[in-house]
Image (cartoon, helix red, strand yellow):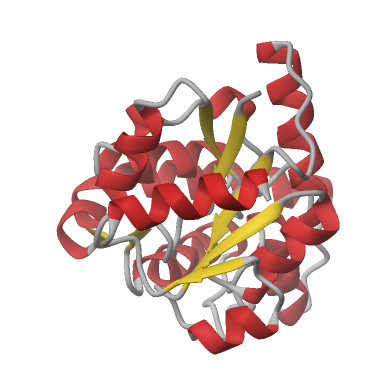
């Protein structure tokens, strides 16, 4: 029996500071012809939800056409800013060692469950050399659904098709840094290891109901134990 580990990306594995907001602003102006006055809350949310709400905040109807154009332009903009992502962003402490250690185990499969659309998720992890440790084919992304909880079952179904194994709440671990990640895991059918590496404190994450909370990913052995203990408890 293998464990499916689904990583959140932003503020769990990497951080790129205010660059995401900056890129969203550039893309908004490019697509709509208007300056960005207010960006929807991005914390623990999907690109689909962020984009739709941001457009509505400016009185723009998020039609299928404009959402498609926005998504394509956003993906292109992140790709074009890879050097900025590299110089202004960072891998969070212990992230590389954690995913590398889990990758070496025969009883673990790793992918991502992220609010980023797939091209942006691939771009961000590739910039920091983390792409080789996850199977993007079984991940779930920010254009797959506006809400995060359905992404869990989507990733499980993709993993089942690819690997011929069934993954459920007892064999799926979501690793994230926000109460929304905890909610997504529990509503979607996964156990949660929460990491207080973003804006949410360890107490916030415990209050949200995470099975285990780590201050960071810096202790690789502790990360491995957390993931395996949660999946087998």
Whether residue 70 is visible to the viewer of this picture, yes or no, is no
Residue at 52% x, 25% y is 107
Q: Could you tell me residue 5's position as x and y percent?
A: 56, 40
Q: Nearer the viewer, residue 47 or 175?
A: 175
Q: Nearer the viewer, residue 131 or 110?
A: 110
Q: Could you tell me residue 18's position as x and y percent?
A: 35, 74
Res. 223 image quadrant:
bottom left
Residue at 71% x, 70% y is 55
Query: Is 140 drawn above or below residue 23 in the view shown?
Result: above
Side (left or right) of 44 relative to 188: left
Q: Nearer the viewer, residue 111 or 224?
A: 224
In which quadrant will I find the N terminus? top right
Q: Could you tell me residue 161's position as x and y percent?
A: 75, 14
Query: Is 216 drawn above or below residue 58 in the view shown?
Result: above
Q: Could you tell me residue 132's position as x and y percent?
A: 34, 26
Residue at 40% x, 35% y is 102
Residue at 67% x, 13% y is 162
Side (left or right) of 7 relative to 215: right
């Amino acid at each position: 029996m293998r464990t499916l580990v689904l990583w959140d990306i932003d503020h769990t594995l990497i951080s790129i500071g205010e660059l995401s907001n900056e890129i969203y602003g550039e893309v908004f102006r490019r697509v709509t012809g208007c300056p960005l006055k207010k960006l929807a809350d991005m914390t623990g949310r999907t690109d689909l939800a962020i984009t739709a709400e941001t457009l509505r905040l400016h009185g723009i109807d998020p039609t299928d056409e404009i959402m498609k154009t926005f998504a394509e332009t956003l993906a292109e903009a992140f790709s074009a800013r890879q050097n900025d992502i590299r110089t202004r962003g960072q891998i969070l402490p212990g992230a590389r060692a954690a995913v590398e250690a889990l990758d070496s185990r025969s009883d673990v499969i790793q992918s991502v469950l992220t609010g980023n659309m797939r091209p942006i998720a691939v771009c961000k992890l590739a910039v920091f050399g983390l792409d080789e440790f996850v199977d993007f084919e079984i991940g779930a992304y920010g254009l797959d659904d506006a809400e995060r909880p359905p992404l869990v079952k989507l990733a499980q179904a993709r993993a089942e098709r690819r690997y011929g194994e069934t993954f459920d709440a007892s064999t799926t671990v979501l690793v994230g840094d926000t109460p929304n990640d905890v909610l997504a895991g529990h509503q979607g059918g996964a156990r949660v290891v929460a990491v207080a590496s973003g804006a949410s404190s360890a107490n916030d994450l415990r209050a949200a109901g995470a099975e285990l909370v780590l201050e960071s990913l810096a202790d690789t052995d502790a990360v491995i134990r957390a993931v395996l203990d949660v999946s087998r408890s």
